[in-house]
Amino acid sequence: MSLFRRTSRRYLVVLAVAAVIATAFVQRHLVVHAQPSEPSQLTVYSPQTTYSVPVLEKNGQPYVGLVELLEPLGTVDARPDGKKYKLRYTPPGGKPREAQFTEGKDKGKLAGNGYKLPGNFILQSGRGYIPLAVVPDVMLRLATLEVEYHPASRRLFAGNPPERFTLELRKDTTSRLFISFPAAVNPSISTEAGHVHFTFRREPVIPAGADSVKFSDPLITGATFSEQAGVAELDVLGTAPLMANFADGGKTIIVAAAPAPPPPVAQAPEPSAQAPSNVPVPAPPPQKPSTPRFLVLIDPAHGGTDVGAAITPSLAEKDIVLALARRVQRELANRGIAASLLRNSDVALSLDQRAVAVNAARPALYVALHAANTGRGVHVFTSLLPAANLSRQDFLPWDTAQSAFIDLSGSVAGSVAAELEARKMPYTTLVAPLRPLNNVAAPAIAIEIAPATDKVEEIASASYEEQVAQSIAAGIAAIRGKLPEVRP
Amino acid sequence: MTRRILLVFAALVIIAIGLAFYALQLRRKVARDEQLAAQQQIAIAPPANGPSTPVTLYVASDNNGALTKTEMNAVLPAERSERDRSILRGLLELYLQPQTSHPIGAGADIRDVYVMGDDTAIVDTNSAFADAHPSGVLAEELTVASIVTTLNANDARIAKVKILVNGQERETLAGHADLRRFYLASNVGQATKDVP
């Protein structure tokens, strides 16, 4: 009997190992299109902007790209040279500071001083990566910004401290929770039975007091704050359905009991004979019309797994256009023109997603940015679609929405071309069968930068990008008066 | 109890081995299909005999972003779609030369041209045409424009052109030029500067 048991155990072990090996083999060969896991990110809150930086697992620890980290804050000129990587960062209106690292080494230089990384520096496809752990130190030494870092949630507050909100429960006729912020907030809000949940993706908020608060109140019983994966969340608990309202220009959120649902129609009482029939129904308060604004939406093409054109083996189109987009945004801001980026990090967006996002944003002008090593100088494109005499107020066909704006788009292209001409930069103006240009219901142009000379690497040089960005911004500023402002 | 566990494990192992074998067969089938598809791409046009005919090619140049009109004589098949295909293959041949001013991916070819309803041409290219095409708005636009304009110049009834890749519709040529749409020859004419 014991011999049988020993034999059975041996068989069991052998069979279990075989099953594991066979299952692994099946998974390896049968799973063709495995879904990539959601990439983790570092969220950086700075006085200029809020942005996210992809966090990559390398050598068993998290790493971030130096350029991705610093570029939204100032001007970055990064040059890989063999195994060496040199980076010059210039804050707006400040002096440049340099960093130098070597691939596979943990020692380098930061702002003129020797610096030791907690892991080896990684140079991959021309991009330099440093361990996430040293990001606060690098921001302090290179960007000269005071930082507060929350490692568990990967939220980094650079330049300004986090904005602390307060909770105050007021008990008048009914209980209301006042959540007060130093600046206006715009969280996404979800409600479910006994909960109101706020998700803050762009706001640098943390509670002024404890993360978890309990109230001795029959309606609102507590609130819990948490941070994870680069976002902050606040959950307000109640014993009845709750709802949230904004007040004080978005600086205050008031949580109160949700109004009771209206009684079913079948049970509604008949109108009383005594009820005055001529009582005027109070009209809803007149909606204050939103102010028209002039917003330029800049779309750095490609991103994520879609790298676009390989300008050189280490220079991808997606990176060049993101850097250029940020420069154009700064140049427009210098000219008093508001601009936002369709993507401000290395994320993939489909052409349809881009078109939907643009049309939802209702910009006064859409500018798509591309880069290539074909041709010379700057190529300025408008849509190939023929102009159509469509009312811009009507619903427009998705595939040909741009037809209604072709004339305005052409004017913008001409204005940018004139600025390129004035700066003696080589350029070509053309029409192109390019999406999502055709789907955009706003004046729209696409700009493709190519090297101005035979030196292909110059396409990513700070001086060339600066010249192009200035030409684009000056061209837009010159034509601004002819483009209609749009109500958001 | 022990025997029951043994039986369950044995069954699981048999199922796992069976699945592994099935996966292996699937991989082999995919590889065979890909090889077959690659062989089919290298279709050979029927030999043409007869008098040579004047042919107009609109040849793209990346340097000036223009199409250059080029006249030549060639012996072409009599059948209309085969004739159109031969002309386009001749155009791609120019782009595949080492000294070309508009390089395209090695191995690019036209699998077929289908003429539908007299005025519409469906140009079916091979995978290499799109997969190895240089990425860029200008580069892709010039390729599309030269195909459409050349077709229209030699077969004036062709007013609309659609480009397929390996028999399938594709969103873009190499990340930029829209391949989902039908191109109007009259419209594409304005896409590039025409250098006579």
Image (cartoon, coloured by chain):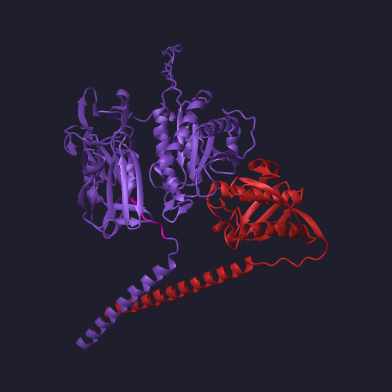
Chain colours: A purple, B red
Q: Give the x, y percent position of residue A446.
A: 52, 39
Q: Residue at x 61, y 56 (%)?
A: B100
Which quadrant would residue A249 be assigned to in this image?
A: top left
Please state, as top left, top right, bottom left or bottom right, where the C terminus of chain A lies in the image: top left
How many circles with numbers are drawn on the protein? Answer: 0
Q: Main secondary structure of the magenta part?
A: loop
**Residue nearest the viewer, comparing A473 with A298:** A473
Q: Give the x, y percent position of residue A108.
A: 24, 53
Which quadrant would residue A157 be assigned to in this image?
A: top left
Q: Give the left or right position of residue A142, taking residue A407 as reference.
A: left
Q: Residue at x 55, y 47 (%)?
A: A375
Q: Give the x, y percent position of residue A241.
A: 30, 34
Q: Residue at x 60, y 67 (%)?
A: B37
Please state, as top left, top right, bottom left or bottom right, where the N terminus of chain A lies in the image: bottom left
* A41, above or below A224, in the image: below
Residue range of the region highlighted in magenta in the rendering: A34-41
* A384, above or below A473, in the image: below
Does residue B161 appear in the picture of this structure? no
**Residue nearest the viewer, comparing B186 with A238:** B186
Q: Give the x, y percent position of residue A232.
A: 27, 40
Does residue B25 appear in the picture of this structure? yes
Is residue B117 magenta-colored?
A: no
* A393, above or below A454, in the image: above
